[in-house]
């Protein structure tokens, strides 16, 4: 049983550093080989590990942060202090590390399009209603809920847990070719003129610092008027 959480109450996993995409893909290649040089394929390996993974979400998880959550087996969030979002389209590229595949399967076509195309932030209550997370819980109850669930599953035979997870993965996980295709498109467009111009405009407003731009990124993207 593996539980992921964050020591930072404002950020669980903000998103990738857009100045270091090449470095991330190089590191991912070390784990998966040159054909798997993407964060999406790295996260897919997380989905396949022979352990149950639970994400305990407080703060913001956008972009690759949301995609990390989606790669985990289960996601539980603080109702008062959790946001998820896929800001990539607002920057100039579709998501490239699993969001398109996972959100379409979890949310359905219409809601996946809403989540991806608007680049808006979703609070925990709406994310639960849409299926992005398993449950939104009062912040004061989140830790004990996750701990109790982990203990419960920890008492079951490991072989049964892993066999059941593998069978569900076989039905629900995207094929490697689908993940690679999304990654290739992201890596192409994130270097394009539109994405570069919009990213530059965001950096001028304090992007990737603990600023309003980062804290309220969903709203900021909706107002961004860089040249496309």
Image: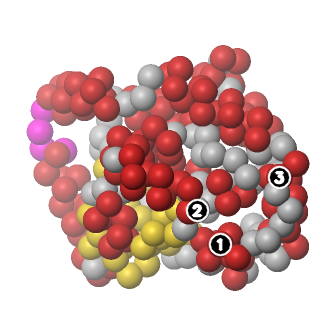
What secondary structure is the magenta-colored segment mainly? loop
Q: Quadrant of the C terminus?
A: bottom right
164 up-or-down from 64: above or below: above
**Label 3 vs label 1: CA separation?**
15 Å
Q: Local crowd at mark 3 within 10 Å, few (<14), some, or many (≥20)? A: some
Q: Are marks 2 and 3 in contact (CB under 8 Å)?
A: no
Q: Quadrant of the N terminus?
A: top left
Is residue 12 visible from the viewing direction of this image? Answer: no
Q: Are marks 1 and 2 in contact (CB under 8 Å)?
A: yes
The residue depicted at 70 percent of the width and 76 percent of the height is: 223
Q: Which residue is mark 3?
A: 194
**Label 1 vs label 2: CA separation?**
8 Å
Q: Which residue is mark 2?
A: 119
Q: Secondary structure at mark 1?
A: helix
Q: Local crowd at mark 2 within 10 Å, few (<14), some, or many (≥20)? A: many
**What is the tally of numbered marks visible in this picture?**
3
Q: Nearer the viewer, residue 136 or 201?
A: 201
Find residue 222 and name its label.
Answer: 1
> x, y (%) of residue 186?
69, 39
Q: Earlier in the sequence, mark 2 or mark 3?
A: 2
> Which span of residues is magenta-colored?
154-158
107 up-or-down from 199: above or below: above
The residue depicted at 56 percent of the width and 62 percent of the height is: 118
> x, y (%) of residue 55?
39, 55
């Amino acid at each position: 049983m593996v539980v992921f959480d964050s020591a930072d109450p404002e950020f669980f996993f903000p998103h990738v550093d857009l100045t270091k995409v090449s470095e991330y893909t190089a590191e991912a290649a070390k784990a998966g080989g040159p054909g798997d040089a993407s964060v999406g394929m790295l996260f897919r390996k997380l989905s396949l590990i022979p352990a149950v993974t639970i994400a305990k979400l407080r703060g913001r998880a956008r972009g690759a942060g949301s995609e990390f959550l989606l790669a985990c087996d289960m996601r539980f969030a603080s109702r008062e202090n959790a946001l998820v979002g896929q800001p990539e389209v607002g920057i100039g590229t579709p998501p490239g590390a699993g969001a398109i595949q996972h959100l379409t399967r979890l949310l359905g076509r219409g809601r996946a399009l809403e989540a991806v195309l608007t680049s808006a932030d979703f609070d925990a209550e709406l994310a639960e209603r849409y299926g992005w997370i398993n449950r939104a819980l009062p912040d004061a109850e989140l830790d004990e809920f996750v701990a109790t669930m982990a203990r419960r599953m920890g008492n079951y035979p490991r072989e049964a847990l892993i066999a059941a997870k593998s069978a569900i993965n076989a039905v629900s996980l995207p094929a490697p070719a689908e993940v690679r295709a999304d990654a290739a498109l992201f890596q192409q467009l994130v270097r394009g003129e539109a994405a570069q111009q919009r990213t530059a405009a965001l950096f001028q407003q304090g992007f990737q610092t603990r600023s309003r731009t980062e804290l309220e990124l969903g709203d900021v993207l909706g107002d961004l008027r860089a040249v496309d």
